């Protein structure tokens, strides 16, 4: 999976920069992304994750689940969910969402600060290799060597569903391919970012009460590519593919002081509506 994600990143950036280098500057009539402008957007995402080794430590346990699979949990898009979830101000933060504010430090170059709310759910029923020891009553494991273990509700539920939150600073470059004044424009974009992970992790394990707190758990880096379509004055739609890596070594798990750590790669696919001003 990491190789697949890295290959996707290489392919998308090769295509983007090939298009940018081949586009003629004479085709662009007016630069609508000018130094001194700001922008903001709101959108939603889907995400995918590489397998991860998740290590757990506490007073009565020190074990690792190897090559653990997880998926996201975006709300289904139906007629009712659009109004009940996606466009309802009281529930707008329930789906996987994104918002970002940026400033153009030069023509076509912006720096932005944003929040990516993804969700990460370890799949129930999967069988993984487990190493380490557990002395919690009913879950004893005395042999530290690897053995097969099925992840189920009796043993563990592990989710970053409130969520897998990334707060990041990104730099972005835009290259217009088609322009019709300030009303219509189509541009490619590319960028990179770095930030910290601020999850609210939902973990039920070994019969313990979960530690249900927001917490800075680690960091993340990312690269991205996509397009921006300006459709009315400075209103725009963006489609973005983001590829990243996160290292979270301080995940809160139980009220009794248990913690976890993990690293993994992720894909994130974003659709967003925004405005430049």
Image (cartoon, rainbow, N blue to C red):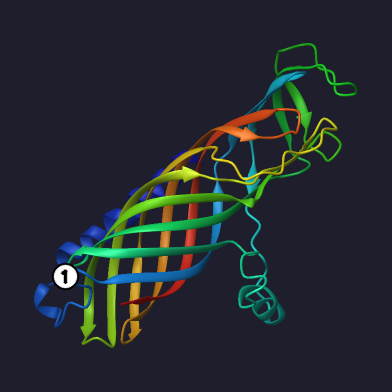
Front in this rendered view, residue 252 or 264: 252
Q: Could you tell me residue 269's position as x and y percent? A: 48, 60
User: Is 102 rendered above or below residue 187?
Assistant: above
Residue 216 visible somewhere in the drawing: yes
Q: Could you tell me residue 86's position as x and y percent? A: 62, 74
Q: Secondary structure at mark 1?
A: loop
User: Is 245 rendered above or below residue 233?
Assistant: above
Q: Residue at x 44, y 42 (%)?
A: 220
Q: Residue at x 34, y 72 (%)?
A: 228
User: Is 236 rendered above or below residue 248?
Assistant: below
| 3 lies left or right of 133 | left
Q: Could you tell me residue 225's position as x and y percent? A: 35, 59
Quadrant containing the C terminus in the rendered view = bottom left
Front in this rendered view, residue 205 or 141: 205
Front in this rendered view, residue 129 or 76: 76
Q: Residue at x 36, y 55 (%)?
A: 224
Q: Residue at x 29, y 77 (%)?
A: 186
Front in this rendered view, residue 74 or 48: 74
Q: Residues within 10 Å of mark 1 (few under 14, many from 20)?
A: some
| 144 lies left or right of 97 | right
Q: Could you tell me residue 257's position as x and y percent? A: 71, 27
The residue that mark 1 highlights is 23
To which quarter of the image does residue 124 belong? top right
Q: Residue furthest right?
A: 138
């Amino acid at each position: 999976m990491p190789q697949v994600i890295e290959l996707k990143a290489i392919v998308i950036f090769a295509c983007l920069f090939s298009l940018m280098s081949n586009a003629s500057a004479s085709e662009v009539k007016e630069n609508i992304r000018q130094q001194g402008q700001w922008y903001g957007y709101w959108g939603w995402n889907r995400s995918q994750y590489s397998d991860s080794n998740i290590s757990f430590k506490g007073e009565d346990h020190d074990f690792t689940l190897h090559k653990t699979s997880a998926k996201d949990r975006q709300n289904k898009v139906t007629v009712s969910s659009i109004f009940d979830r996606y466009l309802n101000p009281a529930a707008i933060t329930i789906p996987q969402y994104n918002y970002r504010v940026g400033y153009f430090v030069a023509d076509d170059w912006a720096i932005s600060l944003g929040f990516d709310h993804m969700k990460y759910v370890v799949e129930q029923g999967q069988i993984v290799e487990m190493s380490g020891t557990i002395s919690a009553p009913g879950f004893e494991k005395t042999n530290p060597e690897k053995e097969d273990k099925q992840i189920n509700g009796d043993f563990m539920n592990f989710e970053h569903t409130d969520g897998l939150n990334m707060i990041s600073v990104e730099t972005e470059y835009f290259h217009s391919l088609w322009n019709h004044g300030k009303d219509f424009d189509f541009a490619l974009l590319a960028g990179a970012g770095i930030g910290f992970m601020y999850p609210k992790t939902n973990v039920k394990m070994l019969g313990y009460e979960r530690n249900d707190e927001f917490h800075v758990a680690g960091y993340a880096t990312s690269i991205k590519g996509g397009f921006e379509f300006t459709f009315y004055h400075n209103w725009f739609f963006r489609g973005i593919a983001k590829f990243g890596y996160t290292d979270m070594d301080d995940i809160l798990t139980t009220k009794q002081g248990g913690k976890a750590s993990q690293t993994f790669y992720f894909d994130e696919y974003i659709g967003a509506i925004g405005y430049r001003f």
